[in-house]
Amino acid sequence: MNAVSKVYGKGKSAVAALREVSVTLPKGGFTAVMGPSGSGKSTFLHCAAGLDKPTAGTVRLGGTDLSGMNETKLTELRRERVGFVFQAFNLVPSLTVEQNVTLPLRLARGRTDRALTDRAWLNETLERVGLGGRTTHRPAELSGGQQQRVAIARALITKPEVVFGDEPTGALDTMTARDVLTLLRETVDTLGQTVVMVTHDPVAASYADTVLFLADGRIVDSLSAPTATAVAERMTRLGAYV
Ligand SMILES: Nc1ncnc2c1ncn2[C@@H]1O[C@H](COP(=O)(O)OP(=O)(O)OP(=O)(O)O)[C@@H](O)[C@H]1O
């Protein structure tokens, strides 16, 4: 991402959510994004993932420049090359676990064969997230942690270049959150999956390789091999807990 700015609104009511942010998120790495409320974390994630267009600057995914893409191309890119995990799981209630997980494959144009032939990858993914025995359950029959595991499997099924998480553990209790973070960590360590996650929680951020700190639309700090204590201390310095 190079010199990315995002302004919401016009004239007097304009809000600069990102101000010339330049950063490279390492392939095969786990990056957490933290910052006080309103610092631009969600905007950063949305611009990086092609969910929102920057007002200025360029965003690249792998070798692809997202700037010139129309909405159709961006939709295709989001379906095939990125995965998303949200705080609210966002599963389809009427579909089984397996149907939810394979939804991105069925939505991708011309990928029906892949959905059928990639049975081994589907099974491996369901096993990896610990849902091998629950493929015919519906979301309402699962705990919050299990539902988020379904969402993670759904994000991984297309073998995306990046998995983006927006507060993926925000709705989970502490123990369940740790399981989900361990799972995300494993996808980085064993699959070489690139993960970028916005979080408010220093413990969650400590599972990442690097934490980026945003304040007032700028990256103001970063921390490698973070501990929860070190992250909390930087956040306090940014005035996040005042
Ligand atoms: N759609 C929008 N229209 C107008 N202003 C917006 C919009 N989305 C975000 N903003 C503003 O942009 C700034 C950054 O918002 P953003 O949601 O990216 O911050 P955040 O760090 O994710 O906040 P939080 O931690 O509270 O979720 C804020 O001042 C916010 O009010």
Image: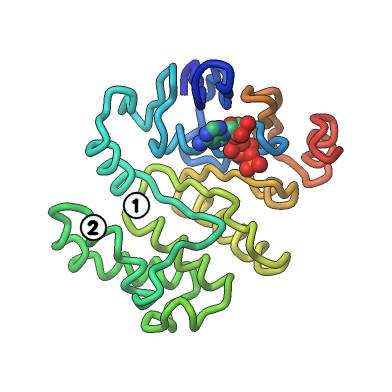
Q: Is residue 138 visible?
A: yes
Marks 2/1: CA–CA distance: 15 Å
Residue 108, percent from left and from top: 22, 53
| Figure label count | 2
Left/right of residue 39 with respect to residue 124 in the rendered view: right
Residue 171, percent from left and from top: 63, 62
Mark closest to the chain's N terminus, 2 or 1: 2
Ligand 1 is found in the corner quadrant, namely: top right
Above or below: residue 213 compared with residue 92: above
Where does label 2 land, which residue? 107
Label 2 element class: helix
- The circle drawn on residue 159 is 1
Q: Amino acid at mark 2?
A: Leu
Residue 30, percent from left and from top: 56, 43
Is residue 186 or residue 228 the one in the foreground? Answer: 228
Q: Amino acid at mark 1?
A: Lys
Residue 210, percent from left and from top: 64, 36
Q: At 13% from the left edge and 54% from the top edge, which residue is drawn?
A: 110
Q: At 41% from the left edge and 34% from the top edge, which residue is drawn?
A: 52
Q: At 51% from the left edge and 23% from the top edge, which residue is drawn?
A: 7
**Which quadrant would residue 234 be assigned to in this image?**
top right
Is residue 157 or residue 21 the one in the foreground? Answer: 21
Is residue 228 or residue 166 the one in the foreground? Answer: 166
